[in-house]
Image (cartoon, coloured by chain):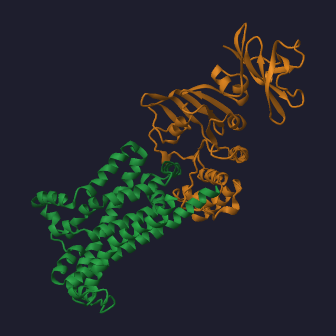
Chain colours: A green, B orange
């Protein structure tokens, strides 16, 4: 009886409060950014009045917007590719040859999540005088972003590999004449498609959200542009922040859509054989 | 057809000795099984032949050539695994063609070879199915076709039937033997199932604790075991104390008499197990207070529990220990 009350009343209530906790500030931000009404005059009564995308169009037309977005996309692609090149062979190796080291590697990869990005910034400031030749390039952010994204990228590849009978697939491939590299390219990567997509999307989300390091290294990435733009045009700046949030949410929804059918297929397969 | 030879192979995993002075020569075209309990080293021997494990000492040679410096992917051995090893992203045809693609064959040759292999394993109509659309038995047949498609010098079978149900296992067992006979490929088969080993092999190697206890034809290892371990592991055995020590006797070397004065040992029937053409009868012997198992053709004696019977030997005992 008590369980039923919890299931029908308390649980939905908790969910509602939690949803409100997230949605209300976003909704307030959206009203501030896209409703052409003075903040002091915002009321429930004028909820549907004077909505406009003009602040966003104005941000899009800024000279720096295109450049910042392009740089962030380049960084996202570079970070994603380098993460994959580093992680896929490493995690395969750990799974096959050093399974006992897996928990240590997992712990190490979570450090960038535990230690704030400002910690890495302090390290960068120390090496900055000796590595200007490298840090001058906009793409010098890539290695730092690879580290920042590790908690997410490692887990997506690791869980993808856990779902495979990796040892048998690798040995089957090798017994059929494929060396290590060809085995990774022809056997492992095609069977990790969903995990790799997740890894890439998560990388994009990290790169589109990282502000601290870019700001310290004076790189005009999309988040750095958003921060600056907010100073001159708060409405447009918050409009961009909402847009960035929508894009990230869409990315996660795509991950969900891409990964669901395959797991469902596997469940069906297990049931029939 | 090529010979495969293990010479003085030693392999340890930490303090555990997996193989100790392991010597075995498999003649060209021969089907040999390694039979033994879990942890006896049989799979380690196969994995060393495949190149997935490195021996601590000794050599493996293929046709007289030392394989030690050759990596797994250049050994030209086909392998079928215990777990289903098909590539989940490829359909049946592409799985079978997988090993051929790296051998730079023309696509028409590959297509012909795939057709031929699917015909051999009797799966011609299922080329466009994906692994998850196949039963376990079908998946193992595709794995066999894939392993044979590359025309390997040696076929390695690592308990390929153990994940299958009894009926499929029996059918596939016959098919593997037929295919091996037709192709003539030298085959090393690893199993812990004595029925499989005895039914399929030209010779059986019985292993215990990293050592080969005996290598011989199925008849030899069953009828003339070289050690008590082989006698106990292959088939059922009765251990009966006698004036020569404890003699090891197969159930079919004993016969049962309803007249208690006809046999050598008197006892009481404890249980009988009907097995179709034969019945196994467990008898507790009075003098020895020990259970023995007698194998009788069904219909000769039903074995009612509690009946008083006598038992005598109709064949020789295998060993005295």
User: In terms of image quadrants, where is residue B319?
Assistant: top right
Work out whether B255 lies above or below B168. Answer: above
User: Can residue B64 be seen in this snapshot?
Assistant: no
**Front residue of A205 and B186:** A205
Furthest residue to the left? A129
User: In terms of image quadrants, where is residue A152?
Assistant: bottom left
Percent x, y for residue A71? 25, 74
Q: Quadrant of the C terminus of chain B?
A: top right
Furthest residue to the front? A1
Instruction: Please report the residue visible at 39 percent of the width from the left and 66 percent of the height from the top.
Output: A14
User: In terms of image quadrants, where is residue A43?
Assistant: bottom left
**Front residue of A116 and A48:** A48
**Front residue of B12 and A58:** A58
User: Can residue A154 be seen in this snapshot?
Assistant: yes
Percent x, y for residue B7? 52, 29
Give the left or right position of residue A228, taking residue B266 as reference.
Answer: left
Give the left or right position of residue B174, taking residue B299 as reference.
Answer: left
Percent x, y for residue A100? 38, 42
């Amino acid at each position: 009886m008590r369980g039923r009350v919890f299931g029908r009343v308390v649980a939905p209530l908790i969910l509602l409060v939690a949803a409100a906790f997230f949605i209300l500030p976003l909704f307030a931000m959206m009203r501030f950014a896209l409703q052409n009404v003075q903040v002091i005059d915002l009321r429930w009564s004028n909820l549907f009045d004077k909505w406009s995308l003009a602040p966003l169009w104005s941000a899009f037309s800024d000279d720096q917007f295109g450049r910042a977005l392009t740089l962030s996309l380049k960084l996202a692609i570079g970070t994603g590719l380098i993460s994959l090149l580093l992680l896929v062979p490493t995690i395969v190796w750990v799974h096959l040859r050093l399974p006992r080291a897996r928990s240590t590697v997992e712990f190490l990869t979570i450090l960038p999540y535990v230690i704030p990005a400002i910690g890495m910034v302090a390290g960068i400031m120390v090496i900055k005088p000796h590595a200007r030749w490298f840090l001058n390039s906009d793409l010098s952010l890539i290695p730092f972003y690879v580290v920042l994204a590790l908690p997410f990228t490692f887990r997506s590849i690791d869980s993808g590999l856990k779902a495979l009978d990796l040892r048998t697939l690798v040995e089957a491939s090798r017994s059929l004449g494929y060396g290590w590299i060809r085995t990774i390219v022809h056997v492992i990567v095609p069977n990790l498609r969903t995990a790799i997509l997740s890894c890439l999307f998560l990388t994009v989300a990290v790169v589109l959200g990282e502000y601290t390091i870019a700001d310290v290294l004076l790189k005009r990435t999309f988040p750095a542009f958003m921060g600056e733009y907010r100073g001159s045009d708060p409405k447009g700046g918050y409009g961009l922040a909402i847009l960035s949030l929508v894009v990230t949410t869409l990315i996660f929804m795509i991950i969900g859509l891409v990964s669901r059918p395959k797991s469902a297929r596997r469940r069906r397969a297990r049931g029939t054989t | 057809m090529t010979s495969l030879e293990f010479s003085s192979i030693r392999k340890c995993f930490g303090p555990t000795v997996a193989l100790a002075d392991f010597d075995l020569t498999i003649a060209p075209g021969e089907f040999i099984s390694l039979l033994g309990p879990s942890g006896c080293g049989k799979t380690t021997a196969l994995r060393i032949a495949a190149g997935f494990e490195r021996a601590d000492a000794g050599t493996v040679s293929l046709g007289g050539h030392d394989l030690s410096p050759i990596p797994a992917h250049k050994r030209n051995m086909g392998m079928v695994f215990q777990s289903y090893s098909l590539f989940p992203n490829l359909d049946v045809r592409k799985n079978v063609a997988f090993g051929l693609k790296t051998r730079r064959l023309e696509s028409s040759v590959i297509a012909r070879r795939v057709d031929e292999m699917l015909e051999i394993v009797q799966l011609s109509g299922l080329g466009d199915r994906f692994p998850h659309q196949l039963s376990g038995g079908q998946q193992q047949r595709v794995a066999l076709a894939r392993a044979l498609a590359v025309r390997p010098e040696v076929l390695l079978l690592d308990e390929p039937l153990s994940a299958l149900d009894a009926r499929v296992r029996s059918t596939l067992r016959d098919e593997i033997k037929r295919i091996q006979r037709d192709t003539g490929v030298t085959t090393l088969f690893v199993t812990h199932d004595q029925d499989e080993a005895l039914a399929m092999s030209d010779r059986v190697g019985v292993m215990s604790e990293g050592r080969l206890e005996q290598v011989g034809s199925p008849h030899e290892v069953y009828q003339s075991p070289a050690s008590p371990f082989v006698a106990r592991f292959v088939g059922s055995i009765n251990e009966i104390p006698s004036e020569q020590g404890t003699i090891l006797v197969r159930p079919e070397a004993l016969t049962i008499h309803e007249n208690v004065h006809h046999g050598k040992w008197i006892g009481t029937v404890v249980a009988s197990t009907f097995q179709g053409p034969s019945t196994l009868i467990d008898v507790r012997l009075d003098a020895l207070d020990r259970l023995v198992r007698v194998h009788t053709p069904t219909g000769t004696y039903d074995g009612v529990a509690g009946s008083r019977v006598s038992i005598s030997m109709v064949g020789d005992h295998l060993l005295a220990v």
